[in-house]
Structure formats: structure tokens, C-alpha cells
Image (cartoon, grey):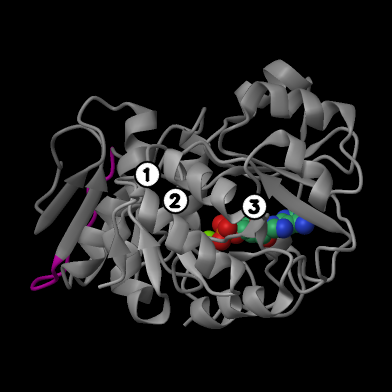
Amino acid sequence: MAIFEPTKENISKAAEHIQNGNLVSFATETVYGLGANALDPTACEKIFIAKERPHYDPLIVHVADVSMVSLVAAKFPEKAQQAAEAFWPGSLTMVLPKKDVISDSITANMPTVAVRVPDHPVAKALLEASERPVAAPSANPFGYLSPTTALHVEEQLGEKIPMILDGGECDCGVESTIVDFTVEPPQLLRFGGISKEQLEEVLGSIDLGKPVLERPLAPGQLASHYSPNTRLEIISPDDVPLIEAGQKVGLLTSGKDASFKVDMIESVSVDNDLEEAAHNLFSALHRLDDAKLDLIYAHSFPEEGIGRAIMDRLRKAAIKLK
Ligand code: AMP
Ligand code: MG
């Protein structure tokens, strides 16, 4: 078992692992991260190996506070500073011009680096004790459901990493929002914990850009992500799908009831609260995926606020490349 309580002693041990070029998984408010010293390309390579992550998918670099941005980014434009003031620490990742200390392997050969100051006491303690920027994507095998508990990480990657710092269930439950500040107006590359509406209140209008993973780099590298092993289909809450005899079916919904007979139901928010739904989304999908169903139906969510991030994850979960 690689799960450790975030005691002072264990935080120091974890920071030593980071300094020695090893991997540590740690809680953040979005999802659990799989971290390595961002200034050590050999250490970062271990992330790609453990996750079986292709090198065309760059890593997010985490720093303890805004003063550390200048360690990794060559420029910190005014709009990005305003965003930092409004949303950091928090679930906003900024794409900025990179400094040479950040190796091309972390940024998929791009001249930019993605940076975030997380808002979780465990992440903060680890970053402070490590005294280094820490590159950390989500701590799951590439393409699979993201982890929102230490146990999710243990089940998927436990044998590959010396330490998982347990910080309980992730509060936000979906990944950070990614905004590219190297262009004007800034471009939103991934929906996440901070909504487009919240960003626009501070930054004025922002564009929807194409995320790195959706640029046509090579055939087959595209939109599937966050995916359970079980087939998933999105349906409208008004739909009553035809279910074949003998088919074991699960439903991801919000509210209380299913309008058709299912073998398993996971309601992510009984009161239809979108923040609560995001918080519970991946845990519910993990449970549905573990239940050996033939099919998971997911009710669609309103595309407003964090509902956009939920629908982004569900759409990608519904696409299978295999
Ligand atoms: P993950 O932490 O696993 O959720 O993945 C990190 C996300 O950040 C991926 O979608 C990357 O494509 C994105 N990302 C990391 N670095 C950059 C960058 N320099 N420019 C644009 N997107 C990035
Ligand atoms: Mg991920």
C-alpha cells in the first residue's frame, strides 16, 4: 500500500522523493496529481512511463505561489497576473511562454509552459517542502478516468509509485481550466473548475481555442479521454432508451430517479447542483466501471458554469478508440 497520511514527517519524505527524482502522487483540489521535479527531465520521464502517456501530451507544472511563476515562465502578461490575483490558488492553469529550464519533453516541444498554483493544503505543503516546481498530470493511466481519491490512485498506479499523499476526496473533482495567455484575447483550452463565466468577469471576453490533444497531430490521438472501460452513452434526461434483454445497464444521473429500469444508479447530485455533480463525477464513474456492466448511460447536464466541464468529460468518456 502506497497511501500515506499527510503528516509532517510524510510530507518531508515525499519532498525528498521529489528532490531525488522519484514520483509522488498527491491530493489537489481538482484531481490527484502524479508529481516529479519539473526541473529534472529524467524524473519527468518517469511520469510518462508510469501513466503510459504519449509525449505529445505536455505536463502541467505546479508551483507553491505566484512568486514562483518567474522560475518557469519567461513572461507573465498583465491579464495573466489579473487572473492569478482572482483565481489563485485555485483550479486555473495558465499557458505562458516557457523558460529554458523547463525541458521540451515536459511541454511537448512547444515554446509554452502550463502553470498552476493549487489550492489544497497537501499540495501546498508538498510544493513548499520540495522547494521546486513540480510537474504533475492527473494520476491515472493515460486516457482512463481521473482519480479523485487516494484509493483510485492506489488501484491504478499503486505499484508504480513509492508514495500517495492522501488528502481526502478532491473538493472540485474535475481538472483545472486551462487558458492560453500567450494570445490576445486569451484562449480557453480546457473547461474545468473555473467556469468561462467566472473568467470573463475578470478578463473580459475570451476565445475558445483548440486544446493540444484535439489538434490533429496524428491519426487516432484525438478526443477520447477520461474513459471508463465500460461503454458509455450520453442521453437526454427525457429519453427512455431501449435496453436489450439480459443487458446489465447503469445510469449516471442527477436528481433521484431513473425513468427506466437499470441495474445500478449513481446520482451525482440529488439536488441537481452542478458543483456537487462535478465533485462526485469521477467517483461515480469509477463505481459504475467497477460494477461489470454492459453499458453506462449518462444523463446530459446543462452546459453552463461547471456543467460545461462535466459535459466535456462525459463526451470524451463516450468515445472509444479501442
Ligand atoms: P492532465 O494534467 O493529465 O489533466 O493534463 C494536462 C493538460 O494540460 C493536457 O490536456 C495538456 O494538453 C495541457 N497542457 C499542458 N501544457 C500545455 C501547454 N504548454 N499548452 C497547452 N496545453 C497544455
Ligand atoms: Mg489527465
Describe the element under mark 2 as helix, strand or loop. Answer: loop
Please say whether residue 198 is one of the residues in the magenta stretch: no
Q: Which residue is the site of mark 1?
A: 170
Q: Is residue 309 visible?
A: yes
Residue 215 is left or right of residue 148, and the answer is right
**What residue is drawn where x is 29% and y is 64%?**
3
Residue 244 is drawn in which quadrant?
bottom left
Determine which residue is flagged by label 3.
131
Circles 3, 1 touching at the beta carbon (< 8 Å) = no
Q: CA distance from mark 3 to mark 1?
A: 24 Å
Q: Please report whichever mark, 1 or 2, sits nearer to the chain's N-terminal start.
A: 2
- In the image, which is nearer the foreground, mark 3 or mark 2? 3
- Give the side of residue 321 with respect to residue 167, left or right: right
Question: Splitting the image into four quadrants, where does ligand 1 fall?
Answer: bottom right
The residue tagged 2 is 31
Observer-side mark, 3 or 1, equals 3
Instruction: Left or right? Give the position of 71 relative to 304.
Output: right
How dense is the environment of label 2, judged by Cα within 10 Å: few (below 14), some, or many (20 and up)?
many
Within 10 Å of the Cα at label 3, are there few (<14), some (14-19), or many (20+) other Cα atoms? some
Mark 1 touches mark 2? (CB < 8 Å): yes
* Residue 21, quarter of the rendered image: bottom right
Secondary element at image label 1: loop
The answer to whether residue 292 is above or below residue 80 is: below
Pick whichever of labels 3 and 1 is earlier in the sequence: 3
Q: Secondary structure at mark 3?
A: loop
